[in-house]
Image (cartoon, rainbow, N blue to C red):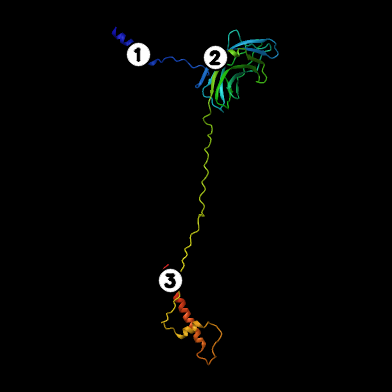
Amino acid sequence: MRIRAVVSFVFAGCLALLCHPVQAAPLPGAERGLRMAAEVVEYECTTDGVTEKQNVEINVELTLPDDATTGRQMSIGWRGTYVTGSELRAPANGLSGVKLYAYAALAGIANLTSATGVSDPLGTVGGGQIIPLPTAVVNMKTTSANAGTASVWPAAVNIGPSPTSPTIECEVRNADELTAYTLTVTQDGQTTATPSPTPSPTPSPSATTSGSPRPTRTVTATVTAAVPDEDDEVAPAARDAVATPIGAAATGGGGEAGPDGRVYVLTGLAISLAAGAGLLLRRRLLPR
């Protein structure tokens, strides 16, 4: 008995290690960063060329992005399933080559009013038969130029060959009863920053220096000519040279009056040069 109990315990432990808990599979179309919401939307559908209108109820599931940013296209998922007994039916002549066009209404952000999506072709539907809804998520796309918080709710659904030529138009009847889901659009982080202003270069100082002119030093030297004393003996020739101007008119009696006058002229010139040299030497020796 003990051996059987031990074997049972070991077997149960192995099963616990090998078997993992079963996790619920994610819903089709659900992606990371998305929020899902669903509610019943009541439509009034008008078929081209048919007077009678149809009241249709669809369980609409919206998938909202959590990472919407300005300037970048965002996608709001649309998926619908009929409420039993309230399906949309094709006209008597049937449908072929048509698609479903889903719309979402938005409010709260300037210039952001709607999102539009288109499904794959729905195939051929016979007259009076239920028009199948797309099984894949219909991505309703839009782009916001402004950041902010918008309210989102399901809007019209059309069926036809093109968005401008719908065969069946379905308008929401209970718009006031629908829940407005929140969509936040943030400013794009890659927006180019405003460049910092470049400081103006400081002008370099001018090469010419302004200011008062350099003062000129003026030295005045007083030169006093040496006057011989009365006791000093002056040669008669020197006195004669001083008294008689050079080149003056002759005052003597001609060649018989004495020596040649050129001797006196040369002597006076030598004395003048000596006196000038003395004055220059005296000027240099005087204190400044």
Q: Is residue 189 left or right of residue 90?
A: left
Decide which of 286, 179 is in the foreground and name it.
286
Q: Residue furthest left?
A: 2
From the image, tell me which residue sits under label 3: 284
Decide which of 91, 103 is in the foreground and name it.
103
From the image, tell me which residue sits under label 2: 38
Q: Tag 2, which secondary structure?
A: strand
Looking at the image, can residue 136 be seen? no
Verify CB contact (< 8 Å) between mark 3 and mark 1. no
Residue 79, above or below 229: above
Decide which of 93, 182 is in the foreground and name it.
182
User: Within the image, what quadrant is residue 21 found in?
Assistant: top left
Q: CA distance from mark 3 to mark 1?
A: 128 Å
Instruction: Give the number of the mark in front: 3 or 1.
Output: 3
Q: Residue furthest top?
A: 1
Q: Position of residue 17 (x, y in %)?
A: 37, 16
Of the residues under marks 1 and 2, which one precedes in the sequence? 1
